[in-house]
């Protein structure tokens, strides 16, 4: 590490990985309920498990972005973080808010809005923590060297904060609620988070490939332009069935096509730069995650998202297991793998070690990625069958569930293998360093 405040990233990564484990465990529990419907039904109902699963995902991803920002901004801006004390305050507020939300859910206290279930006071704490973070990072960037990576990252983080404020608007009218609800849920993951993704991936590629910064920044401009342009207007594909004017059908369909472009560009960008560099970086595990991220994001967020974003298709598939297939692979490919790539790159430096436990780390990559791919195919097949039985043959809901039960078993199995991969990753990233221990024994 070149700057001592980069060490602020370490506690953020630890908190993020702890919540990552919570999220995966909750996902396995939720998958178990699908095959054993009465499992934990009186102790922790399914909707509470699902809240913990989805909210833990969002919070640990944000903690990862915060930690990554504290690691890369000093290097990009060539100065230390403006206020380490504020960074610690922010971490305390955010982790407390996350834990308070989980406890609230377990006691049945929540707002009931999907992904935004947090009680109002928890949302306020999260917003305060986010504002503290933005203030700290913005001052650091303004006082230091300006790079395309730091500016794009800052733009994405500001966007995430501003659009989160719509979570506080909760109108009584359900159609109006959904209109603005998507301004948080969609614009985050298909808009401003893509800027964060592009900036973090650019930083990793600069470090891992050694390719000239100007070449990487030119690609970054193209990706950011398409992400903002298509992501904001692509929100229209969520407006088909909530009472908005019919022109949203055309806007949603057109910009859903364009939303695929930045993800495809990221795939070309990453592989082209690695090919051009011809460089063998010692951290092979970080390179594997960095290349896997845009590939899986392209298929999960890009291709699967596009397949059921057209009005004529979405009319039948909306709300089926196809949505779950898209959501799982999109989040895993675009954002989970991004954070895991960054942790794999940064943790050796934070722990003052050479890249370590790489074979184990790469095994975790293949276990989690393979499991998520199987889960996605399973849910996609279940969704196609569900669509036909429910929307074409008009079969009853419970009868349909019995028809697709086999797919739920496959999903549970793939979830268990994903959990094994996650535990393997945690040990490889935070456990004892096997390679160096072997070297020490030989010496």
Image (cartoon, helix red, strand yellow):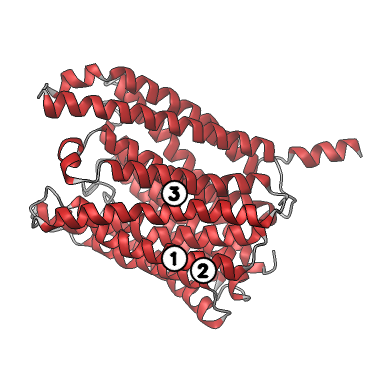
The structure residue drawn at horizontal position 47% and vertical position 46%, both measured from the top left corner, is 336
Sooner in the amino-acid sequence: mark 3 or mark 2: 2
Q: Quadrant of the N terminus?
A: bottom right
Marks 3/1: CA–CA distance: 18 Å
Relative horizontal placement of residue 315, taking residue 110 as reference (left or right): left
The structure residue drawn at horizontal position 62% and vertical position 62%, both measured from the top left corner, is 206
Q: Quadrant of the C terminus?
A: top right
The circle on residue 34 is none
The circle on residue 334 is 3
Q: Is residue 354 above or below residue 143?
A: above
Residue 439 lies in quadrant? top right
The circle on residue 222 is 1
Q: Which residue is mark 2?
A: 218
> Residue 101, image x and y in percent?
34, 49
Q: Contact (CB < 8 A) between labels 2 and 1?
A: yes
The structure residue drawn at horizontal position 50% and vertical position 54%, both measured from the top left corner, is 64
Relative horizontal placement of residue 363, taking residue 388 as reference (left or right): right
Residue nearest the viewer, comparing 64 with 130:
64
């Amino acid at each position: 590490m070149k700057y001592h405040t980069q060490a602020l990233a370490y506690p953020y990564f630890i908190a993020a990985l702890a919540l990552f484990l919570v999220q995966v465990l909750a996902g396995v529990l939720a998958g178990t309920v699908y095959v054993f419907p009465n499992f934990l039904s009186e102790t922790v109902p399914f909707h509470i498990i699902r809240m913990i699963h989805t909210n833990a995902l969002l919070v640990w991803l944000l903690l990862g972005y915060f930690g990554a920002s504290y690691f890369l901004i000093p290097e990009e801006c060539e100065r230390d973080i403006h206020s380490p004390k504020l960074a610690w305050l922010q971490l305390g507020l955010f982790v407390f808010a996350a834990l308070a939300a989980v406890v609230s859910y377990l006691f049945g206290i929540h707002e009931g809005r999907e992904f935004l279930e947090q009680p109002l006071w928890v949302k306020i704490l999260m917003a305060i923590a986010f504002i503290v973070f933005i203030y700290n990072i913005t001052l650091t960037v303004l006082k230091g060297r300006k790079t395309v990576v730091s500016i794009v990252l800052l733009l994405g983080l500001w966007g995430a904060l501003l659009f989160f404020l719509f979570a506080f608007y909760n109108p009584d009218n359900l159609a109006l609620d959904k209109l603005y609800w998507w301004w948080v849920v969609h614009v985050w993951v298909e808009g401003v988070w893509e800027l964060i993704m592009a900036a973090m991936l650019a930083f990793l590629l600069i470090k891992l490939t050694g390719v000239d910064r100007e070449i990487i920044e030119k690609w970054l401009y193209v990706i950011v332009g398409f992400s903002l342009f298509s992501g904001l207007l692509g929100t229209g594909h969520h407006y088909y069935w909530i009472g908005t004017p019919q022109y949203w059908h055309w806007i949603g369909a057109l910009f859903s096509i364009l939303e695929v472009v930045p993800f495809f560009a990221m795939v070309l960008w990453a592989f082209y730069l690695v090919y051009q560099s011809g460089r063998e970086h010692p951290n092979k595990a970080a390179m594997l995650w960095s290349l896997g991220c845009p590939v899986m994001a392209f298929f999960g967020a890009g291709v699967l998202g596009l397949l059921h974003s057209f009005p004529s298709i979405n009319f039948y598939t909306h709300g089926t297991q196809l949505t779950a297939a898209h959501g799982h692979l999109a989040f895993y490919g675009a954002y989970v793998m991004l954070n895991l790539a960054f942790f794999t790159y940064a943790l050796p430096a934070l722990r003052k070690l050479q890249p370590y436990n790489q074979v184990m780390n790469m095994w975790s990559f293949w276990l989690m990625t393979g499991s998520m791919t199987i889960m996605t195919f399973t849910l996609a097949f279940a969704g196609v069958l569900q669509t036909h039985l429910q929307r074409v043959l008009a079969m009853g809901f419970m009868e349909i569930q019995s028809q697709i039960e086999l797919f739920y078993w496959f999903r549970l199995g793939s979830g268990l293998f994903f959990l094994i991969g996650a535990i393997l990753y945690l040990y490889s990233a935070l456990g004892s360093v096997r390679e160096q221990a072997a070297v020490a024994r030989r010496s």
